[in-house]
Image (tube, rainbow, N blue to C red):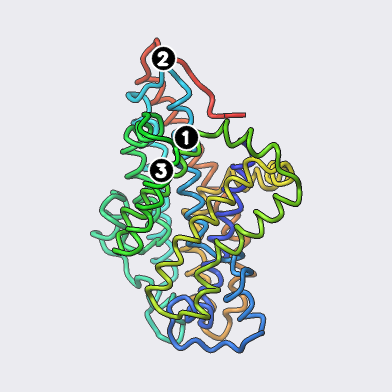
């Protein structure tokens, strides 16, 4: 599904934009709920508290990543009678750990190159970034499953990606073994997310999002047949619904500005992101858009962009200082894309080649090679 590569690329850009926005104290204050000073109806207010927030909804974009990972890792496993788990693990571990190691080294270098400080004048987000590199933090980032040090905050999602990757056989069993109907599995997945939100358990919440992707992989043919009957107006309505749901945290903040309401909004936000994945995969118009050359290129470098952009954004903000933050997007965004391209060429692409080699070395001779493409 080439369109999903385009969605992944666009989601990575949203994460980049979210961190650029957060260098501005007013937007950071809105996220951290500290001394928010925005006049109703201003451009700042509109891009924060309306569905326009989708432009920098970085946290919600990660929900899209989780669903996509569940889908694309489960799909080949359930479509091959000779799928090799012995080959899967070395391939997957190299594919994740080698770029992460490169990203940690890059992040450390950026902190040493452009010193940070925790001055309150830089806004709540920049103030919360670690100002110094520690060996214990770097080791935690390299291991991933122990949780990130926040030196490179996007690594928080890689903690859950790694856990899901290690537990993939259980997800395949969950998606394929018959017990009740598929709707029972959907209900269990949704219940896990709700319980995770209520009891503030990231494990229950995020791991269930991968399960939703696994269920999509199992039911992908049925979903494709069902969506062929939809007309353009139906897709537009679904797209509008997805946009409203995905940005629910920000529109609901106007009515219930408290932490519990913010946590509770994870549920509609996830449903919106799930809808975005379905729309991207099956809506003809969206397929054409996401299969375009620019978005396919973004999809190719999306992982590199995701891993390397934040140290660039932070370094740019501290380099220019509080009075020149307007220069951050003008400098950080093009530099982030340039670094992502270099990182892809010299780190990610070699890691991918090495992972394929390792997978082939461990693959039994009788196992079949099954393409990832489902259509």
Whether tag 2 and tag 3 are in contact, CB under 8 A, the answer is no
Q: CA distance from mark 2 to mark 3?
A: 26 Å
Q: Quadrant of the N terminus?
A: top right
Could you tell whether 371 is left or right of 225 in the image?
Answer: left
Verify CB contact (< 8 Å) between mark 3 and mark 1.
no
| Secondary structure category for the residue under label 1 | helix
In this view, 345 is above or below 305: above
Residue at the spot 43% in from the left edge and 31% down from the top edge: 354
Residue 18 percent coordinates (x, y): 54, 66
2 and 1 marks in contact (CB < 8 Å): no
Mark 3 or mark 1, earlier in chain:
3
Percent coordinates x, y for residue 242 in the rendering: 60, 57
Position of residue 72 measured from the top left corner of the image (x, y, whole percent) = 49, 36
Residue at the (71%, 54%) spot, across then down? 236
The residue that mark 2 highlights is 367
Residue 352 image label: 1
* Sequence-earlier tag: 2 or 3: 3
- Numbered disc 2: secondary structure: loop
Q: Is residue 292 left or right of residue 45?
A: right
Question: Looking at the image, is mark 2 or mark 3 nearer the viewer?
Answer: 3
Secondary structure of residue under mark 3: helix
* Residue under label 3: 211
| CA–CA distance in space, label 3 to label 1 | 25 Å
In the displayed structure, 303 sits above or below 251; it is above
């Amino acid at each position: 599904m080439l369109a999903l590569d385009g969605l992944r690329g666009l989601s990575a850009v949203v994460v980049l934009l979210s961190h650029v926005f957060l260098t501005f104290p007013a937007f950071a204050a809105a996220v951290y709920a500290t001394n928010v000073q925005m006049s109703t109806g201003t451009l700042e207010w509109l891009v924060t508290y309306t569905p326009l927030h989708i432009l920098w909804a970085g946290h919600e974009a990660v929900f899209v990543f989780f669903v996509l990972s569940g889908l694309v890792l489960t799909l080949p496993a359930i479509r091959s009678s000779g799928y090799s788990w012995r080959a899967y693990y070395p391939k997957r571990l190299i594919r994740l750990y080698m770029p992460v190691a490169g990203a940690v080294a890059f992040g450390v270098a950026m902190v040493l190159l452009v010193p940070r400080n925790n001055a309150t004048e830089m806004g709540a987000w920049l103030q919360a970034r670690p100002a110094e590199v520690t060996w214990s933090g770097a080791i935690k980032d390299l291991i991933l499953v122990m949780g990130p040090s926040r030196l490179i905050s996007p690594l928080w999602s890689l903690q859950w990606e790694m856990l899901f990757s290690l537990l993939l056989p259980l997800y395949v069993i969950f998606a394929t073994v018959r017990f009740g109907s598929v709707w029972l599995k959907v209900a269990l997945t949704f219940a896990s997310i709700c319980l995770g939100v209520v009891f503030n358990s990231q494990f229950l919440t995020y791991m269930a999002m991968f399960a939703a992707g696994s269920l999509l992989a199992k039911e992908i043919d049925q979903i494709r047949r069902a969506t062929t009957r939809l007309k353009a107006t139906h897709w537009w309505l679904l797209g509008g619904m997805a946009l409203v749901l995905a940005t629910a945290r920000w529109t609901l903040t106007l009515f219930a500005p408290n932490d519990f309401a913010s946590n509770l909004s994870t549920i509609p936000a996830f449903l919106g992101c799930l809808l975005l994945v379905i729309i991207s995969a099956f809506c003809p118009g969206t397929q054409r858009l996401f299969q375009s050359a620019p978005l396919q290129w973004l999809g190719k470098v999306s992982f590199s962009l995701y891993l390397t952009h934040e140290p660039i954004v932070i370094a740019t903000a501290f380099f220019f200082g509080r009075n020149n933050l307007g220069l951050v997007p003008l400098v950080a965004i093009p530099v982030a894309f340039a670094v992502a391209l270099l990182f892809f060429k010299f780190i990610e692409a070699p890691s991918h080649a090495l992972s394929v080699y390792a997978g082939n070395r461990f693959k039994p001779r009788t196992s079949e090679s099954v393409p990832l493409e489902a259509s």
